[in-house]
Amino acid sequence: YVGAILWLADVTATVLIMGSAQASEGMKGFPLAITLNANFIGNQTEGIFTAVSSFVKRGHTVSIVHTLVHSADEKLIADVTTNHILSK
């Protein structure tokens, strides 16, 4: 389940950076993750996960995003930090 948790954190960070922009094939400005650091604190095999992302730094070249993934009962599952650049 670690892959699904990491995917959720990455997608949540991407949505934060994109804001109101809609993703499209071959678009310029799509946020590409260049580094990812994940700490998995807990796990669960079923149920609902919630991910919340916030900017550590919102830059023109590089943005840094911190994402926390929690279970439905608010148990911390993962603490993820990603760095992104915008595609050209």
Image: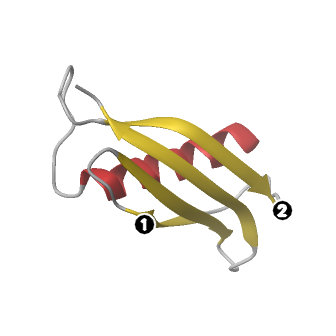
How many labels sit on residues?
2
Residue 77, quarter of the rendered image? bottom right
- Across and down, in percent, residue 24 comes to 18, 29
- Across and down, in percent, residue 31 comes to 34, 39
Query: On the picture, is 82 further left or further right than 2?
Result: left
Tell me which residue sits at (69%, 37%) in the image: 3
- Across and down, in percent, residue 86 comes to 30, 37
Toward the viewer: 17 or 72?
17
- Across and down, in percent, residue 16 comes to 34, 58
Residue 72, quarter of the rendered image? bottom right
Q: In this picture, is 18 found above or below 77?
A: above
Q: The residue under label 2 is which amino acid type?
A: Gly
Q: Secondary structure at mark 2?
A: loop
The label on residue 69 is: none
Tell me which residue sits at (77%, 55%) in the image: 39
Which mark is in front, 1 or 2? 1
Q: In this picture, is 23 found above or below 27?
A: below
Tell me which residue sits at (73%, 55%) in the image: 46
The C terminus, quarter of image: top left
Q: Provide the residue designation for mark 2.
A: 42
Q: Residues within 10 Å of mark 1 (few under 14, many from 20)?
A: some
Q: CA distance from mark 1 to mark 2?
A: 23 Å
Q: Residues within 10 Å of mark 2 (few under 14, many from 20)?
A: few
Tell me which residue sits at (17%, 43%) in the image: 22
| Whether residue 1 is visible | no
Q: The residue under label 1 is which amino acid type?
A: Phe
The N terminus, quarter of image: top right
Q: Secondary structure at mark 1?
A: strand
Q: Provide the residue designation for mark 1.
A: 55
Q: Earlier in the sequence, mark 1 or mark 2?
A: 2
Mark 1 in CB contact with mark 2 (< 8 angstroms) = no
